[in-house]
Every structure is written in C-alpha cells, then in structure tokens.
Image: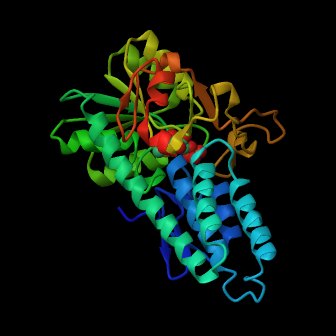
Amino acid sequence: MHPVIEWQDGAVVMLDQRLLPGEKKFIIHRRHQEVARSIRDMVIRGAPAIGIAAAYGIALGVAELEHDPQRDRPEFLDARFDAIVAAITATRPTAVNLFWAAARMREVYERCRGDFPRLSRELLAAAEALDREDYESNRAIGRNGQVLLGERDTVLTHCNAGALATAGYGTALGVVRAAVEAGKRIRVIAGETRPYLQGARLTVWELQEDGIPVTLITDNMAGHVMQKRMAQAVIVGADRIAANGDTANKIGTYALAVLARFHNIPFYVAAPLSTIDPGTADGTGIPIEERDRSEVTSFRGQATARPATEVYNPAFDVTPAALITAIVTEEKVLRPPFAEAIASLRGLRRR
Ligand code: MRU
C-alpha cells in the first residue's frame, strides 16, 4: 500500500482519508498551517500517523523560513519555532503521539538551533526516522501479538488501527497481518465505527486490498456477535495509554471491552510505546476530544436528525485497565498489573 504520508520535494504529501473508499487522492502541503488543518480535519488520522504528520509539519514549518532574512536571529527563530509547534499541537488533544513527536522535534531544535541549514536538515531527518521507526514498531507489535491468536480465530476490531493509521502495516491490524503471514486463517469482523465510519470506510478497505477476509457490522451488533461466539478475540489500537494501563481509543471501545469481559473473550490493545503516556497517571487525566455536532446529526451531508438537535460527540472513550487482557507493544506483551508492566519498559525509561 502507498504510504499515507510522505515528504516529497520540500512538501508533505498525504492520502486524503476522508475520501476513502471511493477515491484515492493525495493532498500536497507546502505550509505547516496546511498540515495542521489536515490533522484537524481528518485528512490523516490514527494516533501514530498523527504523530508522523506532526513531525513532518514541524520540519516543513522550519524549512519555510529558508529564505527569511531573519532566520539567523535566535529570538526570531525561537518565536517562530514555538508558533509552528503550537499550530501543530493545537489540532487534536487525545492522541499523545502528537505531543510525543513534537517533543522529539524540539530536542532536535535545541541541539541545532545555532546553525539553520543543519537545523533544517536534521529536523527532516528526525521526521523521516520517526516515520521509519513507527513502521518497524508495527512489525514488532505484529510479531509479538500474533502468537496470541489461534489458527482459525476471528478477530473483532473497532475503528481503524491499520496501515492507514500508522506508517504502514498497523497496530491492531498489524497483529492480524502478522498472524496471516504466519499461516493462520484469520478472519476479521470490523465495527463500522459511528459517527466517522473509520471501520467501514478504512479498515474494511485496507483488509480487502490485502485479501484478508473481513465482515462489516454496525456497532450495535457487537453484543450479538459475541453472544454467538463469532469472535475469539477483540483487538483495538490506542490513542493514549496512561501509566496504569487505562486506555483511550475510539468512542465505542469501552463498550466492546465491557461486552468482551461479560462473554469471556480476551480484549487486547495493540500500540507502540509512543502511545504510552507515563506522565498521565490514569484515564481520568486523558483529554477527550469532542468533535462537531454535524458528525452526529448528518451522514455525508444528508441530515439524519434536525440540525438544531442537542448533540454530545466525544471522539474517544477510556477503557479501564481492569478490562484489558494484554497490551501488545513492540518491546513485549504487557500483562496486568499494567502499572508495573509499563514501568518496566526499557524503551520508556530511555525516553
Ligand atoms: O479519530 P481517529 O480516526 O484519529 O481515531 C483513531 C483511533 O481511535 C485508532 O484506534 C487509534 O488512533 C489507534 S491507530 C493505530
């Protein structure tokens, strides 16, 4: 699959995920404000992909200053860098990858700010490294997670935690892909994921592209599917995992975790270390994005409720750690108690 985001000739090129599955169109971004708008408007989405977009967006923002006569004035550059980072990070509050990527870019800035050509070069190199590392993490998550699946399991997933949400391959869908590559006959049941339909539009599309059998259900069918023992595991991605394992992911994930517990079906979270936020003690500290009312009162421009109807539209919910069977990371599979397991991660300690 073509990468969802790429640096090409001084521009950030993104696949416009809003148009899938109908149309495959790429948007060329030449200014960091355009990258910020594309993150906010869901041209690119999914926690790791948002982090990669943030890194490229910050590199682009600094590259824009190449011909600015003031670029070698430290106070000017500091103020501009802060403004670029602020524009990029003000887009979506829940996925911690966005802030993690911005912090990594700031480290490069601090190291190279005295030498503009070097700064510009190193920021781009850092964004490309972050992109590559995410892909490698996905592959390792897949390897670590696929052993949890049986030879003929059906996996229920929610939203899109696949190649489209990452540098490629995916987290939850990376586990599925790795199991298929290991010779297992895995099937997927994808919840459509109202209101934005990432499941129907994106997960189904990318699995079909890979020839992995997938069945689409509406979100309210999940209980029935579990009661009928039609899925042997639930695997989802994550937008932010708190230090105690509480996990924010797409709205509807919590309901699936409760259902899975009732039906004694394992509930797995697959996510890279960049999604773990050791600075947030538990789920109550995770900011939950609320999106526009029109996502709930209409469907692709067609009203499904009176436009003035009162609406609550949280984009994410928090699944308590107690409902999670295991968290699959690129380093290892974490088991409860998650606070200890997370604290033991070497990759996090190095950060
Ligand atoms: O609003 P979105 O589409 O950005 O939400 C995406 C999700 O909730 C994904 O499950 C999560 O980011 C993990 S992606 C590997």
- Is 224 situated left or right of 45 in this image? left
Residue depicted at x 42% and y 53%: 134
Task: Give whichever of 123, 169 is nearer the camera.
Answer: 123
Vertical comparison of 72 with 51: above or below: below
- Is 78 situated left or right of 19 in this image? right
- The N terminus is located in which quarter? bottom left
- Is 19 situated left or right of 302 in this image? left
Vertical comparison of 225 with 116: above or below: above
Residue depicted at x 58% and y 34%: 278
- Determine if residue 264 is in view: yes
Residue depicted at x 44% and y 63%: 129
Counting from the top left corner in percent of width and height, residue 335 is at: 39, 22
Counting from the top left corner in percent of width and height, residue 243 is at: 56, 29
Task: Give whichever of 312, 258 is nearer the camera.
Answer: 258
Counting from the top left corner in percent of width and height, residue 12 is at: 55, 72
Q: Residue furthest right?
A: 308
Task: Give whichever of 140, 259 is nearer the camera.
Answer: 140
